[in-house]
Image (cartoon, grey):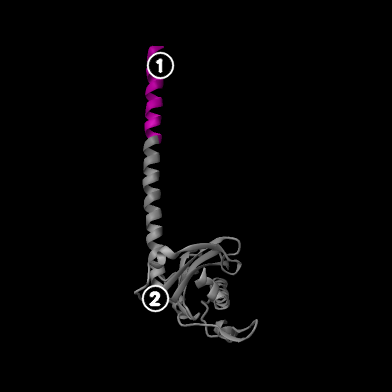
Amino acid sequence: MRLQYKSALFLATASLLAISLLALVNNATQSKIEAAQLQWRLANLSAVLPEGPYDSNPVESVRRHVVPELGGVQMVDIYTAYRQNQPLAVVLEIIAFEGYSGQIRLLLGLHADGQVIGARVIEHRETPGLGDFIDYRRSDWITQFNGQAITFVAPDNWQPSHWLTRRNGGTIDAVTGATITSGAVIQAIYEAVKWFSANKDTVFDT
């Protein structure tokens, strides 16, 4: 009986130690993953901002909002950059909902006048070797948005023709075999540029 008690105590102690060790390993791994994700986000943020100097660190300006045109009902980040107390640029986190394999999250950098500085995909589930061309680490496809803007014609009349794919008379290349992914990113960036162009004063005044 005493031997059984010792065996049970040993097993309980060993189990407790194993659980504690697993928790420690999991916490350490999670911390490393979160740190890597943060570094990845900061690297992409830097890639879509103009060169400094800035009045303050744009990272510290982040605000979280629900903006239907950018992320539906999900909270998205908005960063602003100023130089000599004047609006310089904004970075919008946007979500493309119609990706082939689900949502695609991007960071979109815009000059204060609404011209695109650059865009980077920060999260996606597109098929490796097919839809992952949107990732700058895989191809430079995303750079074709650099310098793009939207022409304002009249109230509620924006000229989007050059935001279409070449096949549809525009200037943007879609990737053969991945037109759904291409279209989702194009549409999301277009809607974000359009929203900012109509709301830039509010973005910088907030």
Of all residues, the one furthest to the front in this rendering is 85
Residue 154 x, y percent position in the rendering: 63, 86
Of all residues, the one furthest to the left in this rendering is 53
Q: SS at mark 1?
A: helix
Residue 178 visible in the shown view = no
How many labels were placed on the picture? 2
Query: Which stretch did the figure color magenta?
Result: 1-19
Badge 1 crowding class, 10 Å Cα cut-off, few under 14, some 14 to 19, many 20 or more, is: few
Of all residues, the one furthest to the right in this rendering is 156
Residue 127 is labelled as: none
Q: In this view, does 83 lie above or below 25?
A: below
What residue is drawn where x is 37% and y is 32%? 17
What residue is drawn where x is 40% and y is 30%? 15
Q: In this view, does 192 lie above or below 19?
A: below
Disc 1 residue type? Gln
Residue ID for mark 1: 4
Q: In this view, does 60 lie above or below 166?
A: above
Q: Is residue 42 above or below residue 3?
A: below
* Cα separation between marks 1 and 2: 74 Å
Residue ID for mark 2: 83
Of all residues, the one furthest to the top in this rendering is 1
Q: Which of 51 and 84 is in front in this view?
A: 84
Q: Earlier in the sequence, mark 1 or mark 2?
A: 1
Q: Nearer the viewer, residue 20 or 60?
A: 60
